[in-house]
Image (tube, helix red, strand yellow):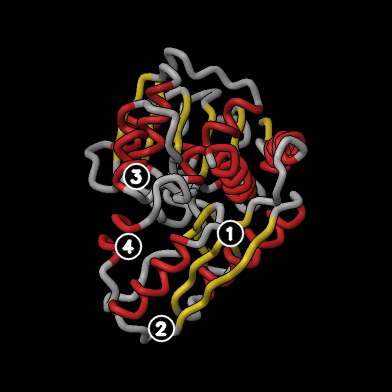
Amino acid sequence: MLELRGKKVSDGIKKYVSKELETLSFVPKLAIVRVGENPDDMSYERGATKKLKSFGLDVASYVFPQDISDEDFKKAFKDINEDDEVTGILLLRPLPRTINEKDIENMIDPKKDLDGISPINIAKVFAGDTSGFSPCTAEAVIEVLKAYDIELTGKRVTVVGRSMVVGKPVSMLLLKENATVTMTHTRTVDLKKTCSDAEIVVAAAGRAKMLNSDYCGQDAVMIDVGINVDENGKLCGDVDYATLDGKASAATPVPGGVGTVTTAVLAKHLIQAAKMR
């Protein structure tokens, strides 16, 4: 079984970023906006900051207290959104319930919205319009498949998960690559058969080791987007990776797979935002 490691893909994107940086007269700046001290958010922030700085890009964190009011956060976000020195924005979600997240999604400048949360960018993803930004994780899935020369045209792909972060946008991106896509979720009847009939499975349900080799057709490709913690406190995906050998032809590990590519896609989007200015 071929292990689809994200480092190879990330290194390829880094070369693209380095080449494009030479054509710019300034260093693009990412604003990471975080509310509260959620450990997952803080971990992602550290990883993204380290990755983008290693790519030669600028990163600034804007951190707000968990109990900030809706009004105060909107004022602060407006300032970041309108700051000419900020090339792109990454908003860590979910926001506290006291803040109207939909309002923020509508506020964000689509040209700075690097993770595709603006209704304008989401509409572009569903319309197959590449002038906007798609969610980084969804795009990372496509980057992995392309980097390892896994053909998508005409292939049967089952996506497990229907979120607006991964499931729905990755289905649209796969359709754009001419794949034949079946979107499923945790309530799909006979999910096991739907997955095992597919040539490629994208697991994005958010349940630890939900899919084992029974969900994998012979020589299928398993792309695991899940980030979970197992019963031993170790990071794991939605796919029980250890069961796949001898069944899958290729699979992404967790950690070290799609997640590694997600932050590289963020860097790529920052470069694209800089070029749009």
Q: Is residue 243 visible?
A: no
Of pointers 1 and 4, the one earlier in the residue sequence = 1
Callout 2: few (<14), some (14-19), or many (20+) C-alpha neighbours within 10 Å?
Answer: some
Q: Nearer the viewer, residue 274 or 244?
A: 274
At 58% from the left and 47% from the top, the residue drawn is: 270
Q: Nearer the viewer, residue 7 or 212?
A: 7
Q: Position of residue 114 (x, y in %)?
A: 49, 48
Q: Which kind of residue does numbered mark 3 sit on?
A: Gly
Callout 3: few (<14), some (14-19), or many (20+) C-alpha neighbours within 10 Å?
Answer: many
Q: Which residue is mark 4?
A: 104
Of pointers 3 and 4, the one earlier in the residue sequence = 4
Disc number placed over residue 66 in the picture, else none? 2
In the shown orientation, is residue 202 left or right of residue 149? left
Callout 1: few (<14), some (14-19), or many (20+) C-alpha neighbours within 10 Å?
Answer: some
Of pointers 2 and 3, the one earlier in the residue sequence = 2
Q: Kindly report the distance in space between the C-alpha atoms of the residues bearing marks 2 and 3.
A: 29 Å
Q: Which residue is mark 3?
A: 161
In the image, farthest residue toward the top: 154
Q: Kindly report the distance in space between the C-alpha atoms of the residues bearing marks 3 and 1.
A: 37 Å
Q: Kindly report the distance in space between the C-alpha atoms of the residues bearing marks 2 and 4.
A: 16 Å
